[in-house]
Amino acid sequence: MATNTSHSHIVSVGQVFTPITWAEWLLLRWGVFDAWITGASVCDPTAGEGVFALALFRLARARGIAVKPEMLVKLTLIEVQPTRLEAFRVKASGDFGIEFPNSNLFAQDIITEPHPCKYDILVGNPPWANFTDLPPSYKEQLKPFFVAEGLVPDKKRVLLGSSRTDIAALVLKVVLGRLLGEEGFGCFYLPSSLFFGDDAHIGFRDYTANHRFFSVDEVCEFTLSRVFDGVGTSYCCARFQMDVQQSFPVRYFRESSGDWIEHSAMPLKRPDDQWRVLEHGDNSCFDGPLGIELDATQKPRQGVNTCGANSVFIFDRKPSHLPSEYLYPLATKEVWREGNGEPHKWILLPYDAKTGRPLPWSKIEEITELRDYLNGNRGLLQSRKGTLIQSAISKGLWWSLLGVGPYSFAPYKVIWEAYGQKQFRPIRLHEFSGHVWQANQAMHAFIPCWSEKDAKRIQEGLLNPDILSLLRQLNGDGKCNWAQPGKIQKILAYETPQSHQPLLCAERREECRTRGSSVRRVPRRR
């Protein structure tokens, strides 16, 4: 067994272990078991304790098939932590009487360390975690790989934390492009955000890995079964085919009343856009953008982000010990019930309402109550975590927040609930006691307006039922990305995307196209 323990400190990040019954289900769903017993080579590149290999053994025993040495040499496990591979060997021996060959166990980080072999089939469940959730030392290791695989345009974008790309996307790009042989396919459990996330996963949806095309053939979305207990992330499983260009629609299955109902999935408009899920047979295109005219200052925005300092900036009642000039009504769920009524929360914004910039400290020092209050919370404010807020703090603006600009102080807002909803209800907010309402972090999104007439026009446009229909097709019902600003912006207007990965040369493109036209949908027997 090849071992390397230098990276064992990172293995706890993003791990979601697969129950053996669901490992069996995936192996049967896409014919992996039958292919293996007839000679196909199978690899789990993020094996953990080898549940997919154990599932193959269990299926063989249920069918009365003896697992022979020539079958074992066609099975490979790769795992970053050697102790987990040893745990697999113990289970294989104790539960099935199988002495698994050391030569087919690799203790390595599949992203950062090269692997010597290629396989007919890949299976598994790569780790689920955003780049920003990774340990700092591991982030530094992975930055060049995110760039090399086309998931972000440059190291600076990764460094600034602007990428919310999931490490599962990086693992997939690496293993599909480097570990799959010609005519190979892969089957994985995945976070659904790879297909339905906004621009964070646009680099994954170029459908190339190591300058080879891949396609998503079929997806199964779990809406009823709890495959992974305690996981709040939306998840699915998908089958990938190498050296075949992506085409749409994709066969897309959802659970319903104990059965799998077929739908079809296709991108919103551009090939790398997030997907829409349509009734089977409905291949209608979105011809957008919808006819709501907006100027350059009216980009949909998210609400004010305190970066973990709600206790400092947000109040249940308007505080009398702080200057009223810098206190603003904060939208809450009651606003949608009661309209533009009495605020249920207030937020402190030590900002210049004309410029949308933080007040200079020289100005704050002239306002005794504000100065004393901020100084009293200085330690907490300076210790806030996050690349962007720490950048502001390093410049001396430790009292600043994120998501504040001139747009925050527009006299009118067309605002909607953007998080965890199933309805799209844009409303107009103006002022309360002379202060404009503020949207609350990711819970809300809004379009700033500078006249009541314009606000009415935009609200009426957003009430177009086609928008609700599109949001539902975009698979955000009840999820955190239900109607976030980026999604609404794509519905209203389109911008030319930035290419994250160099185009394939003409010769390579033609080679893949020719090869893809003759690829069989089952692996070669070896």
Image: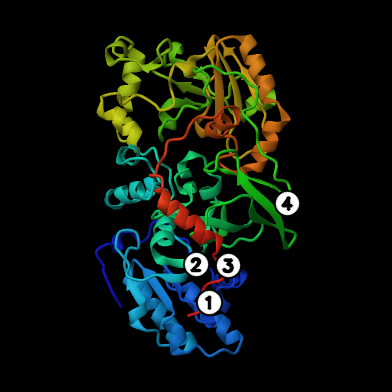
Name the kind of residue labelled 2 in the image. Answer: Glu
User: What residue sits right under mark 2 in the picture?
Assistant: 183
Residue at the disc numbered 1? 55
- Report x, y in % for residue 52: 50, 73
Residue 474 spot, x, y in % from top left? 62, 42
Q: CA distance from mark 4 to mark 3?
A: 22 Å
Return the residue nearer the eye: 427 or 348: 427
Please state which amino acid type lies under the numbered disc 4. Answer: His
Tag 2 secondary structure:
strand
Residue 470 in which image quadrant:
top right
Q: Which disc, if any, is residue 280?
A: 4
Which residue is rendered at x = 69% and y = 20% of the image? 460
Is disc 3 surrounded by few (<14), some (14 to 19) or many (20+) residues within 10 Å?
Answer: few
> Hey, which quadrant is residue 224 in on the image?
bottom right
Q: CA distance from mark 2 to mark 4?
A: 28 Å
The image shows residue 95, relative to residue 167, as above or below, that is below
Whether residue 341 appears in this view of the structure is no
Characterize the local packing of mark 1: few (<14), some (14-19) or many (20 or more) Cα atoms within 10 angstroms: many
Please report contact status of discs 2 and 3: CB closer than 8 Å, yes or no: no
Give whichever of 229, 378 is nearer the camera: 229
Residue 525: which numbered mark, if any? Answer: none
Residue of label 3 = 521
Going by the image, does 387 lie left or right of 262?
Answer: left
Quadrant, the N terminus: bottom left
